[in-house]
């Protein structure tokens, strides 16, 4: 492309120089010839005036004086009644330039050698050609700079596009001072940001899915283990099978939640839910695991509470808190439900060593873990509660006490939450 730009610009420059230079050379030649002819004609007129004056005063025309006054000229003077007066040497054949002036008494003819005029014309033509060459050189330099200015950014933009195609979504943020190229670079930068955001969402979705699905699968595994252990007791097998079906349904809800989060929207709206049902369902699911760990689950507080949220979201948050306590906590785990003037509160607390002071509320930050975990559970749990219009807080680090604050169901008609695309 650079070669084509150079060729095109040079061709335009050559055409421009020819269109201007050739007429200019013709005009210069004509001007020099006309100027020389005017000068020679003016000399002939002056000489004729001097001759007539001498004749009127009965003076003799001095050839030597004419030779001194008009050097390098071939002069012919004719006065009526006098012989033809010739002064100087005639120019070579083919190089003479002659002008004359006439009156009633005679005429004066002056000639000169045109060699000097041709030298002047040659010098002017050489100057014109030199200027044309300089103009072409300037055109070459300008074409080279312009082609470099255009092609190098295009090459860089091509590399940026190739990087985008290979998955490197870093915006260059480089501009080139050419509006059209800067517009292309800006579009590529915006595309890079969008691609980077999409890649980040995919990575987050994969990470979140691996973490969030693990908890329901763990519960499902425990149910299946109970079924295997009680293979000879049909009643227990039936109960555990029904619980496993509930666990599978919950797993499906978790997948829906993850897909909705990946699309940056919540399809489900916060609706009045029975807090007791969700809490008791989680206790039923996790009680076998706590029993094997020789720990107990205790339900305390007010009953019959109703809050705004989604069953799947609250179940997932409680499941995360119970799993964290099972792994990192100790002693009995108490789930206390209560109601304040502003919120329905669900507290989850155990009797373990709690969370180190160095972590504090950082446990809600992504990839921050106090016990060698992935550092995702509490982050996702807080996001799920926030999506339902509530909040998840660490109210006491030792022993670890988490509180879920949800809006009262009576606020449903006044404050309806609909989460759209982020």
Image: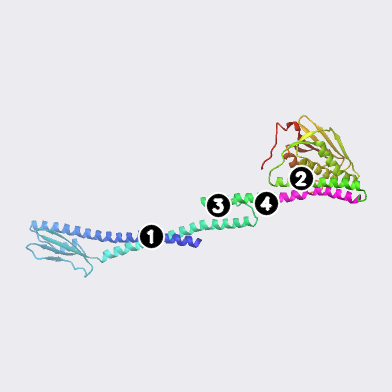
Pick out the residue farthest to the left: 81
Q: CA distance from mark 1 to mark 3?
A: 35 Å
- Viewer-side label of 4, 1: 4
- Whether label 4 touches label 1, CB < 8 Å: no
Q: Earlier in the sequence, mark 3 or mark 4?
A: 3
Pinpoint residue 368: horizontal percent, then vertical percent: 77, 46
Q: Nearer the viewer, residue 380 or 259?
A: 259
Pointer 4 residue: 199
Packing grade of label 1 (10 A; few <14, some 14-19, many >=20) is some
Q: CA distance from mark 2 to mark 4?
A: 24 Å
Pinpoint residue 53: horizontal percent, then vertical percent: 11, 56
**Is 360 located above or below residue 146 in the figure?**
above
Task: Name the element at disc 4.
Answer: helix
Pointer 2 residue: 253
Pointer 3 residue: 184
Q: Quadrant of residue 96?
A: bottom left
Judge from the rendering whether residue 131 lies leftward or rightward of residue 172; answer left or right.
Answer: left
Q: Earlier in the sequence, mark 1 or mark 3?
A: 1
Q: Quadrant of the C terminus?
A: top right
Pointer 1 residue: 17
Point 68% across, 46% down: residue = 263
Judge from the rendering whether residue 191 lies leftward or rightward of residue 249; answer left or right.
Answer: left
Packing grade of label 4 (10 A; few <14, some 14-19, many >=20) is some
- Whether label 1 touches label 2, CB < 8 Å: no
Pick out the residue farthest to the bottom: 93
Packing grade of label 3 (10 A; few <14, some 14-19, many >=20) is some
**Is 82 located above or below residue 254 in the figure?**
below
Q: Quadrant of residue 126?
A: bottom left
């Amino acid at each position: 492309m650079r070669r084509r730009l150079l060729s095109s610009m040079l061709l335009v420059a050559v055409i421009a120089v020819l269109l201007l230079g050739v007429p200019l050379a013709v005009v210069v030649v004509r001007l020099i010839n006309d100027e020389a002819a005017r000068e020679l004609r003016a000399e002939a007129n002056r000489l004729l005036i001097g001759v007539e004056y001498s004749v009127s005063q009965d003076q003799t025309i001095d050839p030597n004086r004419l030779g001194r006054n008009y050097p390098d000229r071939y002069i012919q003077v004719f006065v009526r009644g006098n012989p033809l007066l010739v002064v100087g040497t005639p120019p070579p054949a083919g190089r003479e330039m002659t002008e004359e002036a006439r009156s009633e008494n005679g005429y004066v003819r002056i000639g000169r050698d045109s060699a000097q005029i041709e030298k002047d014309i040659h010098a002017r033509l050489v100057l014109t050609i030199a200027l044309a060459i300089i103009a072409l050189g300037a055109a070459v330099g300008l074409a080279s700079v312009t082609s470099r200015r255009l092609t190098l950014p295009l090459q860089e933009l091509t590399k940026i596009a190739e990087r985008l195609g290979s998955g490197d979504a870093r915006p260059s943020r480089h501009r080139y001072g050419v509006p059209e190229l800067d517009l292309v670079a800006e579009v590529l930068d915006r595309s890079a940001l969008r691609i980077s955001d999409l890649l980040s969402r995919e990575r987050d979705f994969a990470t979140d899915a691996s973490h969030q699905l693990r908890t329901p699968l763990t519960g499902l595994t425990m149910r299946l283990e109970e079924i295997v252990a009680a293979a000879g007791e049909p009643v227990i097998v039936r109960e555990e099978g029904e619980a496993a079906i509930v666990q599978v349904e919950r797993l499906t809800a978790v997948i829906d939640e993850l897909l909705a989060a990946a699309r940056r929207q919540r399809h489900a709206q916060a609706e009045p839910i029975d807090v007791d049902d969700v809490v008791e369902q989680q206790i039923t699911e996790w009680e076998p695991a706590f029993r094997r760990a020789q720990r107990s689950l205790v339900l305390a507080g007010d009953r019959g509470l109703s809050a705004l949220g989604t069953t799947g979201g609250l179940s997932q948050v409680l499941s995360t808190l119970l799993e964290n306590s099972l792994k990192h906590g100790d002693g009995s785990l108490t789930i206390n439900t209560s109601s304040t003037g502003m919120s329905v509160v669900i507290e989850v607390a155990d009797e373990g060593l709690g969370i180190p002071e160095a972590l504090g509320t950082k446990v809600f930050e992504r990839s921050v873990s106090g016990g060698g975990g992935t550092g995702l559970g509490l982050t996702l749990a807080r996001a799920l509660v926030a999506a339902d219009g509530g909040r998840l807080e660490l109210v006491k680090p030792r022993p670890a006490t988490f509180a879920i604050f949800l809006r009262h169901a009576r606020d449903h008609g006044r404050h309806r939450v609909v989460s759209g695309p982020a």
